[in-house]
């Protein structure tokens, strides 16, 4: 027997055990001092060992797998750059969907790195802790690959130059920012419900599937490649989300009503956030594979309802009131959100435009009950004004919702008044707070202490905290160039660049 | 579900009246009109005359609405609401004297002009 005989390799189970020894039982410190967030939210966990990370992935296999994916991703990005891939997209307008993504979603990915790192530290169980840590690293990678994928467009088009400043300052980006801030300042269990379950499991399909298939339909192979690379991570995150929620529900019957409240809250907050995606799908993609309305039918009316049905055995109920509103709004949402952005393109980090006749006809076909009746006449009038050189930009600021921070631009479809904006008011400590919907009012009133702190852009401008009182002054503070990064697509430097690329 | 916190939770009233340099927040909505994409927000001095809404603010805000050409405050029937209560404002008096407070929501409804959107 040789003295240098190799040690037997560890099997997977042993390897996982040794590679994931993050949990410990404190001996010279009190457990509540080491894990101060464990009991804060009222969730009772009797046995952390009951939650095993369903993937049991260890660092060595993680590095290997992700390195292979990254190698493929970066070689395709290189090929895209060398072959002037930007010329092969369907139209210069498409790039504005990417601007919305890099300013709105990419920084949110980074916020999620922080959130999962915090949850990983806050949980006592090893399985939960490792799963959160792995997801934090995934999200960091998503942030990086998105930045690298989209940086190619930065060479040719405006609006990509300072996405993180934009995320922190530009008015409509307070919508995703407040979503991330709200989640990551909650306790670790609510955080997990918000991101792992509601966002990753219920809503991520509404974001990533349309976005990536939209990229494919419009010739953006760089973004498609990022989507493929992230997709296997997303599948893992979804599984983790469901296992996390089941773990909480199974540990103690007292957890059920708490988790139910969080599920309701984050379904509604996530839905409102995805209003941005609705306009991306229906208006910003020159070629749209699916309409927002069709996506709601598939992902909310079918998939989401099936998921809630699975959880019925724990006592979880469908938040029927919210679902009814989502379904009622499906024929109106994207048109209303696009109208908000058309009104305020003078203060945006991307361009808007009115749909051409082909696109209008597509919208009529996809929305036979609503588009021609409520929106086409308005849009045709905008086009008339544009022809006269009077393109409409709002000179005054919107009232935004205290909870979701979107302008109060949603109308009362369920009440039979699609022409009237919905508006709710709450009182707290002698002051009024305005919200856009029953859902947002409910969320505000559950935790007014939190939402009175909301950083609402119009109010911050009025308080003098955003560079000045005029739009050019605020744009300067946004680090946007007036007349370049904002205003209509028609007449923009982006349009000029696109025409040059296509030798028009 | 009150707020959960491991320590004392701070009370930060971000938009209290004292932060607006003598102005107060006022919101205006022309009921049923949606070319202007949402109710609008303004910082107004409480001593501003209510009539200034008619002479300056509503034209600036709502001139894009097709109904605006037919809106004549001397002739058109207008129902005013402040914070959900129907009122008869005195245009020669201030916002404050008319009961408009910080973050008040003013709605004006014109039964003969219900919100055309087309040409």
Image (cartoon, coloured by chain):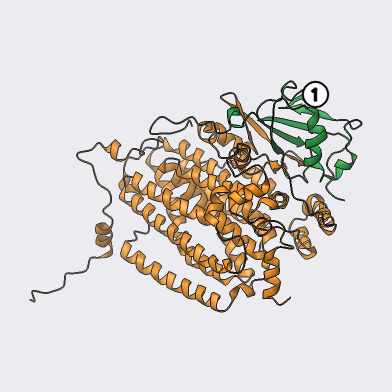
Chain colours: A orange, B green
Q: Residue furthest bottom?
A: A83
Residue at image location 58% in from the left, 39% down from the top? A403
Please state which of residues A78 and A493 is positioned toward the viewer in this rendering.
Answer: A493
Circle 1 chain: B
For the C terminus of chain A, the quadrant is bottom right
Count of labels shown? 1
**Measured along the vertical axis of the image, is residue A273 above or below residue A187?**
below
**Residue most extreme to the top:** B97
Q: Is residue A103 above or below residue B56?
A: below
Residue under numbered circle 1: B89
Task: Say whether residue A380 is left or right of residue A203.
Answer: right
Q: Quadrant of the N terminus of chain A?
A: bottom left
Quarter-of-image position of residue A468: top right
Residue B101 location, quadrant = top right
Q: Is residue A56 above or below residue A2?
A: above
Give coordinates of residue A202: x percent, y percent. Answer: 53, 51
In front of the other: A159 or A411? A159
Crowd around label 1: few <14 · some 14–19 · many ≥20 (10 Å):
some
**Residue at the spot x=42%, y=50% of the render?**
A114
């Amino acid at each position: 027997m040789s003295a240098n005989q190799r040690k037997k390799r560890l099997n997977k189970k042993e390897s996982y055990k040794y590679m994931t020894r993050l949990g410990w039982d404190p001996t010279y410190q009190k457990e509540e001092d080491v894990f101060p967030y464990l009991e804060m939210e009222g969730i009772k966990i009797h046995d952390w060992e009951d939650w095993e990370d369903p993937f049991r992935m260890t660092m060595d296999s993680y590095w290997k797998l992700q390195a292979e994916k990254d190698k493929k991703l970066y070689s395709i990005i290189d090929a895209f750059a060398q072959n002037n891939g930007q010329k092969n997209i369907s139209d210069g307008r498409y790039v504005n969907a990417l601007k919305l993504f890099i300013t709105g979603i990419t920084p949110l990915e980074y916020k999620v790195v922080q959130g999962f790192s915090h949850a990983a530290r806050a949980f006592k169980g090893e399985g939960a802790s490792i799963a959160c840590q792995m997801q934090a690293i995934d999200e960091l990678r998503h942030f990086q690959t998105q930045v690298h994928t989209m940086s190619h467009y930065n060479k040719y088009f405006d609006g990509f130059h300072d996405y993180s400043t934009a995320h922190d300052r530009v008015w409509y980006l307070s919508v995703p920012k407040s979503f991330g801030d709200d989640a990551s300042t909650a306790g670790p269990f609510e955080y997990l419900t918000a991101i792992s379950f509601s966002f990753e499991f219920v809503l991520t399909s509404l974001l990533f599937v349309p976005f990536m298939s939209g990229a494919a339909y419009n010739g953006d192979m760089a973004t498609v490649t990022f989507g493929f690379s992230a997709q296997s991570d997303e599948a893992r995150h979804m599984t983790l989300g469901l296992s996390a929620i089941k773990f909480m529900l199974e540990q103690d019957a007292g957890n059920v009503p708490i988790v139910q409240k969080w599920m309701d809250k984050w379904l509604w907050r996530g839905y409102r956030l995805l209003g941005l995606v609705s306009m991306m799908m229906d208006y910003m993609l020159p070629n749209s594979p699916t309409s927002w309305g069709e996506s709601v039918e598939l992902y909310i009316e079918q998939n989401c309802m099936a998921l809630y049905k699975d959880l019925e055995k724990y006592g979880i109920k469908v938040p029927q009131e919210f679902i009814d509103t989502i379904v009622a709004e499906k024929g109106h949402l994207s048109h209303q959100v696009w109208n908000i952005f058309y009104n305020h393109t003078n203060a945006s980090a991307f361009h808007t435009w009115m749909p051409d006749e082909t696109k209008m006809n597509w919208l009529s076909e996809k929305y036979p009950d609503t588009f021609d009746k409520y929106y086409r006449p308005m849009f045709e009038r905008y086009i008339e004004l544009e022809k006269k050189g009077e393109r409409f930009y709002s000179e005054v600021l919107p009232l935004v919702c205290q909870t979701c921070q979107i302008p109060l631009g949603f109308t009362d479809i369920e009440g039979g008044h699609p022409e009237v904006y919905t508006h709710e008011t709450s009182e707290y400590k002698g002051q009024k707070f305005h919200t856009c919907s029953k859902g947002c009012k409910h969320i505000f009133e559950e935790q007014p202490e939190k939402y009175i702190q909301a950083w609402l852009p119009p109010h911050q401008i009025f308080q003098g905290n955003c560079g000045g009182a005029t739009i050019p002054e605020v744009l300067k503070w946004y680090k946007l160039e007036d007349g370049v990064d904002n205003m209509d697509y028609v007449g923009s430097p982006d349009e000029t660049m696109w025409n040059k690329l296509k030798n028009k | 579900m009150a707020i959960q916190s491991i320590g004392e939770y701070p009370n930060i009233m971000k938009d209290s009246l004292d932060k607006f340099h003598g102005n107060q927040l006022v919101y205006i909505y022309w009921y049923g009109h949606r070319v202007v994409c949402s109710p609008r927000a303004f910082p107004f001095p409480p001593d501003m005359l209510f009539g200034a809404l008619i002479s300056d603010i509503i034209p600036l805000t709502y001139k894009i609405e097709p109904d605006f050409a037919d809106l004549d405050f001397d002739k058109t029937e207008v129902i005013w609401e402040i914070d959900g209560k129907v009122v008869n404002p005195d245009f020669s008096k201030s916002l404050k004297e008319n009961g408009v407070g910080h973050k008040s929501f003013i709605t004006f409804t014109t039964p003969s002009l219900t919100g055309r959107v087309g040409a």
